[in-house]
Amino acid sequence: MAFSNDKLNIGEHFIYNGIEFICLDIIDGNYLAMTAKPWAEIPFDTNNHNDWRKSSLRRVLNTDFLELLDKKHLVMQTSDLIADNGDKAYGTSEDYVTILSCDQYRKYRDIVPLFEEWMWTLTPWSCNTSYSSIVRSVYTAGNVYSSIAYHSNGVAPACLFSSQNLKLCRQAHLVGISDEND
């Protein structure tokens, strides 16, 4: 039975296109969610740089992972790329698919599951060229550490799902509203 007026609850797990997500927050009526399990274990950047805007991981998520979703069900989200030391040189990034920043991880820590592998965040250690290969990651116990960008860590993609283009079925599935709304 579909309850088209129901809302997802923060912390609720749901399935979208066969992928299990966790609702982390409701932002302007839309659902910020991350995968409940790591989608892949890959480097942050194969060229060993910590700038999310130029990272190979960002390209993979916004091509390969995005192909598993329906872009019309997503809202572009802006990520703050402030470094762990407060450096704001990288600015922001707009993506359909991203990963959590350290600040978001801390905010949603009670909801984010601990994984068996380290998990990338998009937070650089510093924007200074002397530290341009160091990215913050979450250790299996939940502590935030530093990792070298070309190492492989777990990736838990995060998306902002549009509540306008989705309906919730209490069987924990989000599905697209008929194509007549295109």
Image (spheres, rainbow, N blue to C red):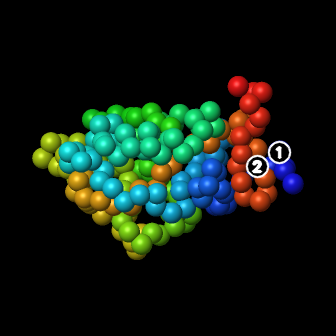
Q: Quadrant of the N terminus?
A: bottom right
Q: Amino acid at mark 1?
A: Ser
The x and y percentages for residue 48 are 20, 48
The x and y percentages for residue 82 are 34, 43
Q: Residue at x 71, y 45 (%)?
A: 175
Residue annotated with mark 2: 168
Residues at marks 2 and 1, CA–CA distance in whole angstroms: 6 Å
Q: Residue at x 30, y 50 (%)?
A: 44
Do we see residue 136 in this rendering? no
Q: Quadrant of residue 172?
A: bottom right
Q: Quadrant of residue 118?
A: bottom left
The x and y percentages for residue 74 are 59, 37
The x and y percentages for residue 105 are 46, 57
Q: Residue at x 71, y 36 (%)?
A: 165
Q: Earlier in the sequence, mark 2 or mark 1?
A: 1
Q: Are marks 2 and 1 in contact (CB under 8 Å)?
A: yes
Q: Establish if 118 lies above or below 33.
A: below
Residue 4, disc:
1
Q: Is residue 42 left or right of 116 when viewed as pictured?
A: left
